[in-house]
């Protein structure tokens, strides 16, 4: 299982990176040692997959600071007796009554029919190119952390134009950690 990673910044400086539970533990220890308190001014945490800013509870009491059930603190799965977890998540789906009626008469019931329909659509749709996903992640990251920096608009235009060839130049005067992380997210 590949674990999603996150990156933490305090102001323009990258201070830590890793899976959510490990990052929370690292930040808690670092901030305690530096006597910054639970949430110092300017602490921002970003998903390395989407570039979106997330909230991370550093109190040490939240479930996000513990490994998910069935996983060790290092992110490896625990093995034990019984059936393996399939990762099924129950969520609400809103449909019209005629849709529910149709689903109820399908082989395997509503859940199985919906899974088949989703799988067929996933096979039919081309995957989002990694380059596009990376540019979108870099955009989300830069919007949160660099929106006030000089040349922000030019950097965003360069990110999406001509494969990002002028992207690094547009960020030339920015702090190195922000530039490096934006380039890494964008794959440039």
Image: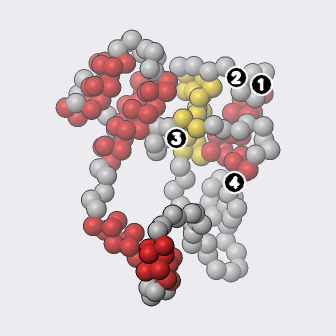
Q: Quadrant of residue 170?
A: top left
Q: Earlier in the sequence, mark 2 or mark 3?
A: 2
* Foreground residue among 112 and 147: 112
Give me the C-alpha separation between circle 1 and circle 4: 23 Å
Residue 48 position, x and y percent, is: 49, 41
**Few, some or many residues within 10 Å of mark 1 (<14, 14–19, 20+):** some
**Few, some or many residues within 10 Å of mark 4 (<14, 14–19, 20+):** some
**Residues tagged 3 and 1 counted as in contact (Cβ below 8 A):** no
Q: Earlier in the sequence, mark 3 or mark 4?
A: 3
Q: Is residue 30 above or below residue 114?
A: above
* Foreground residue among 102 and 51: 102
Q: Is residue 101 above or below residue 146?
A: below
Residue labelled with disc 3: 47
Residue labelled with disc 4: 67
Give me the C-alpha separation between circle 3 and circle 4: 17 Å
Q: Quadrant of residue 126?
A: bottom left
Q: Earlier in the sequence, mark 1 or mark 4?
A: 1
Residue labelled with disc 2: 40
Seen at 49% across and 83% down, the residue is 104
Residue labelled with disc 1: 37
């Amino acid at each position: 299982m590949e674990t999603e990673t996150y990156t933490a910044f305090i102001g323009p400086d990258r201070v830590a990176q890793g899976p959510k539970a490990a990052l929370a533990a690292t930040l808690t220890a670092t901030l305690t040692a530096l006597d910054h308190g639970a949430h110092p001014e300017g602490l921002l945490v970003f998903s390395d997959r989407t570039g979106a800013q997330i909230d991370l509870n550093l109190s040490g009491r939240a479930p996000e600071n513990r490994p998910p059930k069935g996983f060790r603190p290092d992110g490896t799965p625990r093995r034990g007796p019984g059936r393996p977890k399939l990762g099924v998540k129950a969520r609400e789906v809103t449909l019209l009554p005629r849709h529910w009626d149709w689903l109820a008469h399908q082989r395997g019931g509503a859940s199985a029919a919906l899974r088949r329909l989703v799988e067929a659509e996933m096979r039919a749709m081309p995957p989002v190119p990694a380059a596009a996903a990376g540019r979108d992640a870099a955009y989300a990251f830069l919007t949160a952390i660099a929106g006030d920096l000089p040349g922000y608009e030019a950097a965003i235009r360069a990110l999406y134009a001509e494969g990002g060839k002028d992207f690094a130049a547009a960020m030339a005067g920015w702090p190195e950690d922000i530039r490096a992380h934006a380039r890494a997210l964008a794959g440039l």
